[in-house]
Image: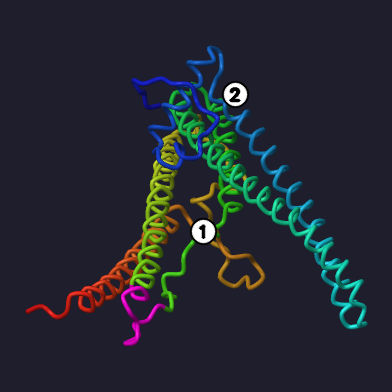
Amino acid sequence: MRTCSARAPMSGRLRTAVRALGLAGLVCLAAGAVSAAGAQTVEDVLLQRRLQYRAAKAEVESARSAAAVYEADFAAALEAADRARRAGDADARERALALAQDRSGPVRSQAQRVEEAVEVLDAAREALISIITVRMEQLVDRLNAASSAAERTRLDRIFQDLSNELQALEDEAGDDLRLDPVALPEVRFDPRDGPEELEIKAQLLERRAAIADSAIAEVDRDVGRLEDRLRIQRQRRDFLAGTDRFDDTRLPVVTGGNPGERTPAPADSTAAPARPLTLEERIAQARLYRQQLEGYRDQLLVRARTFRQAIRFITSGPAA
């Protein structure tokens, strides 16, 4: 396990820190939590993060359920207004529209609550993923130091369970924030555009480029996290390969597999689900996506510069 000189209590607001720090920083955070709480261990922090994640997930489900009720009430009022219009009942239509207006406020408020709850859930999931990664690295260190085959088997089963939990969390997170680098915004030059129109178009392109920059930074963080996991998996794999040389220390075969080390599905099995990507494949995929984002961003910035050059041409005239 890495050591760190700075010790600080682990904050409850981890979203920004977790996304910015690498594994070494996360180990420092875990060590700080243990130091601040005295007898608290990484396992204790992991338990806390699980409870926070489950509470955040329950809050999202509750907020979405309530939002569905508010939206149904709002839709019912709009339908009543439409029925009254078709029936030619002006008074009923006016009452229904007033009711719909009253119900639109709770719909907006609840939508905001859902958005905030999802942000909390995302932060809790990231914090849980991070501490699981720290715990997995700790287990690899303990595997290397274990004095018996039974102890190594016990630790490796815990490792595999955490690895499966980590994969499930990452699958849940999905890739909803991904940009489509193929579809450029429909912002085109028009000879009739004046400086104001050109400025608006340039700003639209630059804002989209800034979003792409944020996505690139997010991909970099994801790649760093995946590389940390790959390093841990390789340490474990190297250790197990070493123990296989000795019959008395060989770990028993455990059914199931680790994410990143799974056996491909049989080639002739058309009904079998697709093989999960290995960590190496996920890293390669993320790096390719980063290249696409860079090209997308650069195209946007080139087009924005073209609009700004046109603004200078219009306002200052051609260079002498």
Q: Is residue 316 above or below residue 5?
A: below
Which quarter shows the N terminus?
top left
Q: Residue at x 39, y 32 (%)?
A: 25
Q: Earlier in the sequence, mark 1 or mark 2?
A: 2
Asked if the stretch drawn in magenta spans residue 261, the answer is: no
Q: Is residue 274 left or right of residue 195?
A: right
Q: Residue at x 40, y 47 (%)?
A: 221
- Find residue 253 and report its image quarter: top right
Specify the amino acid type for callout 1: Leu
Q: Residue at x 35, y 23 (%)?
A: 4
In x, y percent, where is residue 188? 37, 81
In x, y percent, where is residue 80? 88, 71
Q: Is residue 272 above or below residue 310?
A: above
Q: Is residue 31 above or below residue 260?
A: above
In x, y percent, where is residue 274? 58, 65
Q: Residue at x 53, y 36 (%)?
A: 132
State the residue position of label 2. 44
- The residue at the far left in this view is 320
Q: Would you say the residues marked 1 and 2 are in contact, meaning their CB atoms lie under 8 Å apart?
A: no
Residues 229 and 189: in front is: 189
The main secondary structure of the magenta stretch is: loop
- Find residue 98 and report its image quarter: bottom right
Q: Which residues are magenta?
A: 187-198
In x, y percent, where is residue 278? 47, 55
Q: Is residue 117 left or right of residue 230?
A: right
